[in-house]
Image (spheres, grey):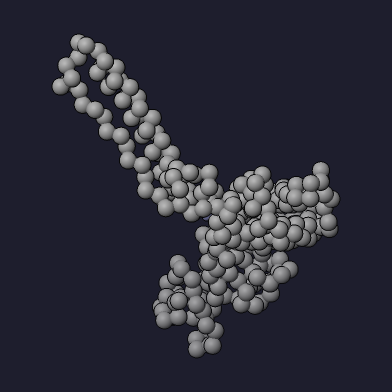
Amino acid sequence: MAYDDSSRWCQGSCMGWARRRMAGYREDVAAYEAVLARYRERLADPSTKPSTLRKPAAPEPPRIIPVLGDPIYCQACTHAVKAKLARLDVAAAIAARESDGMRGTTTEAKVRSTPGPASPSPTIDELEDLEGWLRSWKAAYLGADEVARLGSLMDAITYGTAWLVHRAERILRHRQMAVPFAEETLAWYARLDRYDPTDVTVQRMPLRCPGCKRFSLERRGGEDVVRCRTIGCVRGESISMDQYTAMVEQQAMAAKAATKTRTVVRPPRPRTPAAETEHQKVEP
Ligand SMILES: [Zn+2]
Ligand SMILES: [Zn+2]
């Protein structure tokens, strides 16, 4: 196969580097052809001494061992798109849980109940868009103008995702649908990936939740809030790191006051001086 028969390459990310190389090569060829044309013009000019001319060198084509599409995407890229499609459901559920005003209805205001620096959160509108997008692909697959939403927003997202995951491999082999479907899936995943639990490091926090009193507080990678895992625990929905640090300090003070109690305080960073002196060895 010719090195540049890129129409048969996998259209996925596995050949992204090769497409970039080819694009660079085509630019080099265009520049070379311009230089070559000038060279030939000057060569044809009788007033030019041939010894003053040097023939330009053609650029080397990149060496590419292509991964072919089957027929459009390779297996690895097909599975990568399908996996991300499947994870949209979980990411959407977590986004919904973190978005205040989302209590099974779709019309409430998108207002965060907690003041302070709000972490970016997809709104209900975004989840509505996602659900509409899932349905638009179901309709495209069925050749229908549109299909109706089934159930509540979150149920419809779960259902719509599962429906498409089940058919993803067929869609990704379809000449017209494959590329837009894959690209839109990846774009949706990029919008929601910060809510994908498989992509996020979760730090279990050592203090009990002030709401439900369980060891259920956690902090997700990069966030400056601590949240309680207990469903329905309103008090633990969003605790800022400042508040959490104050809780740690408070508990460390209490532990110090009540000497030789069995309260174990495992302070998170930044450690408080009180906690540091008493519990140096329990810092994870
Ligand atoms: Zn591929
Ligand atoms: Zn709680």
Q: Position of residue 31 (x, y in %)?
A: 35, 29
- Residue 179 vs residue 36: left or right? right
Q: Quadrant of residue 83?
A: bottom right
Q: Quadrant of residue 161?
A: bottom right
Q: Position of residue 146 (x, y in %)?
A: 81, 45
- At 71% from the left and 70% from the top, the residue drawn is 231
Q: Position of residue 174 (x, y in %)?
A: 66, 50
Q: How many marks?
A: 0
Q: Nearer the viewer, residue 173 or 100?
A: 173
Farthest residue to the top: give it. 47
- At 49% from the left and 81% from the top, the residue drawn is 256
- Residue 56 vs residue 113: left or right? left
Q: Is residue 193 visible?
A: no
Farthest residue to the front: give it. 1
Q: Is residue 64 visible?
A: yes
From this view, report whether residue 20 is shown above or below residue 79: above
- At 21% from the left and 26% from the top, the residue drawn is 54
Q: Position of residue 64 (x, y in %)?
A: 40, 49
Q: Quadrant of residue 176?
A: top right
* Quadrant for the C terminus in the image: bottom left
Q: Nearer the viewer, residue 162 or 236?
A: 162
Q: Nearer the viewer, residue 214 or 9?
A: 9
- Residue 78 vs residue 59: left or right? right
- At 65% from the left and 46% from the top, the residue drawn is 175
